[in-house]
Amino acid sequence: MKFFIIGGTEKAGTTSLFEYFVNHPQIVASKRKETDFFRSNNCELEDYVNCFTQRAGEHQTYMEASPAYLGLSASVAEQINQVAPQAQMVFLVRDPISRLRSSYLFHRSKLYIPENIDINTYVQYCLAYQRGQLSLADSPFKNPWFLNVLAAGSYQQHINRYTELFGDNVKVINFEHFCKNTGQVVRDIARFLQIDADYFNDYDFFTANKTFQSSNHTLHKLGMYVNNRMEPFFRKNPSLKRKVVTMYQKVNGKKGITGGEFSAETKALLREFYNPDFNWAKNYFANNQLELEWTNFNE
């Protein structure tokens, strides 16, 4: 069996990449984009295969996209290795400071982060939690995921765990390069998977999963529920989904969002925190003949 896992990171184009491949004739997509299958214990191959829309044929590859797999490498990498040791994995990584801001805005839009917590306060919560100075019970959150977003951007340690286990079956993509050269990157991934890259020659590379700020929270909760229930249908009909989302955003959209700008002090803290990962990325992408445009570190 062949498996293609898009492993992260959050807010770096994983949804768009998944949807580009979802209708490729040599791909069998998961029923839901994010199976998060390997975040649990006691993973079995047969249970994993049941996460997909159908059984793959001889020349087909099972595909899923769970961004959390990167930040949870300490447990997930070994789980994947036990179930699918020949899996091919693509990780999209992004300027970790930009990624953090995008994650904050996205989770604000999903109502997971209260509106009265601006991004600078949010970073302080995350830093305190990481240092052991704050417990989940004493925070405004019910799920530790929202307090672990800093560690998720520590790419070096996470990527190293995967390359130690999977070697050349790991491909790392710079998000900024992906945005500017989408067709080239997608065709390169298809060749990496040894499937037909010409499928994408005249492809419409739309952008999926844009952050959206709602004006009516009750209506938005209903919209998220409907989207979640109908995900398998929308995956098979991406053009219809784009039309529905466009109409919904016109009805329930809100322009602008407050509290999403870093202070100079916060940005300095984040640069210090992520400096090892910035140095790792400079070296990694230079060796792969790609420019690294992480503006938060170059400005």
Image (cartoon, rainbow, N blue to C red):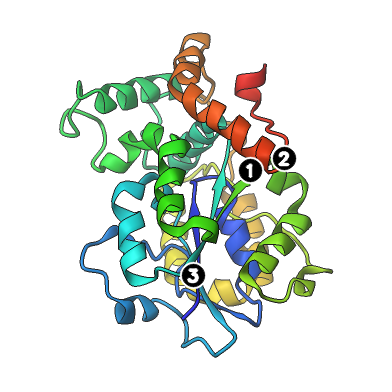
User: Relative to 131, is 178 above or below?
Assistant: below
Quarter location, residue 133:
top left
Residue assigned mark 3: 231
Residue assigned mark 2: 290
Amino acid under disc 2: Leu
Residue assigned mark 1: 174
Residue depicted at 40% across the width and 42% down the height? 111
Which structural element holds mark 3?
A: helix
Give the crowd class for mark 3: few <14, some 14-19, many >=20 residues within 10 Å.
some
Residue farthest toward the right in the current orientation of the protein: 202
Q: Position of residue 259 (x, y in %)?
A: 49, 23
Q: Are marks 2 and 1 in contact (CB under 8 Å)?
A: yes
Decide which of tag 3 and tag 2 comes sooner along the chain: 3
Q: Position of residue 89 (x, y in %)?
A: 51, 60
Real-space Cα separation, disc 3 to disc 2, in angstroms: 35 Å
Which-is-in-front pick, marks 2 and 1?
Answer: 2
Residue depicted at 46% across the width and 45% down the height? 159
